[in-house]
Amino acid sequence: MNRTIVVAGAGILIAAAGLGSWQAKNGKTDTTPMNALAERYVKTVLALGQHDSDYVDAYYGPPEWKHEADARYNTKVALDAIAAQAGAVRADLAKLAPASEEISRLRQQYLDRQLAALEARVRIIRGERLSFDTESRALYDAVAPTVPAAHFQQILDTLDKRFPGQGSLAARYDAWRRPFVIPREKLDGVFQTAIKACRERTLKHVTLPASETFTVEYVTNKSWSGYNWYQGDYRSLIQVNTDLPIYVDRAIDLACHEGYPGHHVYNALLEKHLVSDRGWVEFTVYPLFSPQSLIAEGTANYGIEVAFPGRERVEFERTVLFPAAGLDPSKAAEYYEVQTLVDTLAYAGNEAARAYLDDRISAADAAAYLERYAMYSPERAKQRVRFMDQYRSYVINYNLGKDMVRRYIESRGGTADSPARRWEEFERLLSSPRLPSGLQ
């Protein structure tokens, strides 16, 4: 997941001089009418951050904006006023003629949908209960398909034959998987090795700013397994949660998803191409509960197979990561054969969340569903329910987002047998303000 609050969400009054001096230092200055609306959007997002500590996921705009906000606001801006501000910006945005350049038209569409999602988030904070699907469409511009339990059961029946014996299938799978845990004392070395490989593979195809970098921390007591805190100036802090055992496949998953070519690359490219090169100030702020998150999570998950396609991943794991973790490399192919099948259960997490958040099942039932149909351990299932409590329909961004990104890139010729084209289309998507509905 991608999370950072470099500047706390506070009520805003932004001095024009602050914006001008920041843009002069950081890149091109945009003086079009769109940028005036973009400034108002940033103010509105940061104002809502006063009410919702998870909402402002990244902000690296002018430091003067925070200083002035601290000086002028001692109380939260009322939610009604925030909703009115968003509506006013959308109304003024609708008065603009469509831009002639495609990326500028995408910018206009992006700003409108981001503001619409903000209005929906205000309604949720006020206490309005939206259904799972209504909420995901309002916030993330997409609705996940409904998948019946029978679909997952067919996959489980195949796995059941793979792991015969007594006890639940999840318990048998967990017992088989236990030898693939990365020992705690080897975790950082394995993870750093994975990051290095992900970065090398990404830089062969994607041009990044020379100063880009990130650091890694290991944390506990979180509802997520990993998080990218983007800090601006092409820097990230990546946190890895060590509450639960970390299996060997998670090293590449997290290194790609949070780093290269995932969140770190996505944020760095947006900063370079849209903020620095074009002066589009709206991209200095990232509201978590917005369509941008489906693009962020979808590209981060799809980026794993872009960087390590097919057998290349298994071979890298066998020759590099398994030995680094002190695991038996002869088991690598078998391990990934099973994991590929288990990964097809991903949408079971959506079904558990949909039923739970629509008040059709309890938290305990949601955890039991994850254990039965997603092969989660009891501890991981409880952690995932905590995630649902905190982030709600955000869960669709990982699996649906990945599938939407894959279909979009493949429709443009970026197929597995055309890796150079796939990287080209992937980088183009990461550098643009395209919406989830624009991936259709």
Image (tube, rainbow, N blue to C red):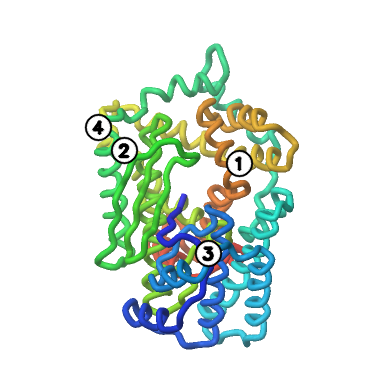
> Where does label 1 land, which residue?
389
Q: Position of residue 365 (x, y in %)?
A: 67, 29
Tags 4 and 2 touching, CB below 8 Å: no
Three-letter amino acid code of the residue under disc 3: Asn
Give the residue at mark 2: 317
Amino acid carrying label 1: it is: Asp
Q: Of callouts 1 and 3, which one flags the residue occurring earlier in the amino acid sequence?
A: 3
Secondary structure category for the residue under label 2? helix
Q: Residues within 10 Å of mark 4 (few under 14, many from 20)?
A: few
Are there few (<14), some (14-19), or many (20+) residues within 10 Å of tag 3? few
Q: Earlier in the sequence, mark 3 or mark 4?
A: 3
In the foreground, 430 or 404: 430
Asked whether disc 1 touches disc 4, contact meaning CB atoms under 8 Å apart, the reply is no
Query: Is residue 318 or residue 60 the one in the foreground?
Result: 60
Residue placed under numbered mark 3 in the picture? 74
Residue 368: % across, % down? 63, 27
How far separated are the C-alphas under marks 1 and 4? Answer: 38 Å
Report, in whole angstroms, how far the alpha carbon at label 3 lies from the one at label 4. Answer: 56 Å
